[in-house]
Image (cartoon, rainbow, N blue to C red):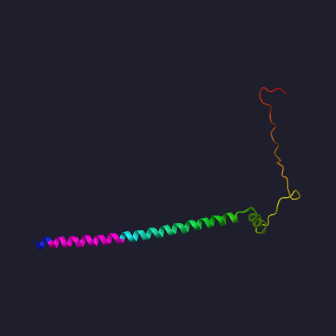
Amino acid sequence: MTRLSIVLLAAVIFSAMYLVRVQYDSRRLFTELDHANAEARRLEVERGRLEVEKRAEATSLRVEKLAKDKLAMRTVTPAITEYVTSAVALPVASAPRGARP
């Protein structure tokens, strides 16, 4: 009977150690999940901030200012408009079939 007691004691100790290990893993995974959720919230806030910043950078006034300042562009006026004509003659459209002149 002492052998059976020793085997049962070993089984109880083993199951207790296994239970402690499972609880530890569970807590560790819960903590990792909490950190991942916090990181996801932080990234979502950052994405929203960047989208607002992108919209602010793409306003027509800002683009026009950058075009004038950095690219030395100017607005179009009739005084600086150049008209280009093609030297190739355009083909004359023929009358549709069955139409009378």
Q: In which image quadrant can residue 99 be found?
A: top right
Task: Return the x and y of residue 60 as percentages of the image width and height.
Answer: 74, 62
What residue sits 43% from the left and 71% below the top?
A: 31
Quadrant (top left/top right/bottom left/bottom right) for the C terminus? top right
Considering depth in this image, is 87 or 72 the residue closer to the camera?
Answer: 72
Task: Return the x and y of residue 29 as percentages of the image width and height.
Answer: 40, 69
Figure check: 45 above or below 83 = below
What residue sits 56% from the left and 65% below the top?
A: 44
Q: In which image quadrant can residue 48 be found?
A: bottom right
Task: Return the x and y of residue 91 as percentages of the image width and height.
Answer: 80, 39
Question: Would residue 8 be counted in the magenta stretch?
Answer: yes
What residue sits 78% from the left and 69% below the top?
A: 69
Task: Tell me how many marks there are.
Answer: 0
Q: Give the range drawn in magenta.
A: 5-24
Farthest-out residue, right: 79
Task: Return the x and y of residue 95 as percentages of the image width and height.
Answer: 80, 31
Which SS does the magenta portion mostly show?
A: helix
Q: In which image quadrant can residue 49 be found?
A: bottom right
Lateral position of residue 83 relative to residue 41, left or right: right
Lateral position of residue 41 relative to residue 30, left or right: right
Considering depth in this image, is 57 or 41 the residue closer to the camera?
Answer: 41
Quadrant (top left/top right/bottom left/bottom right) for the N terminus? bottom left
Lateral position of residue 52 relative to residue 38, left or right: right
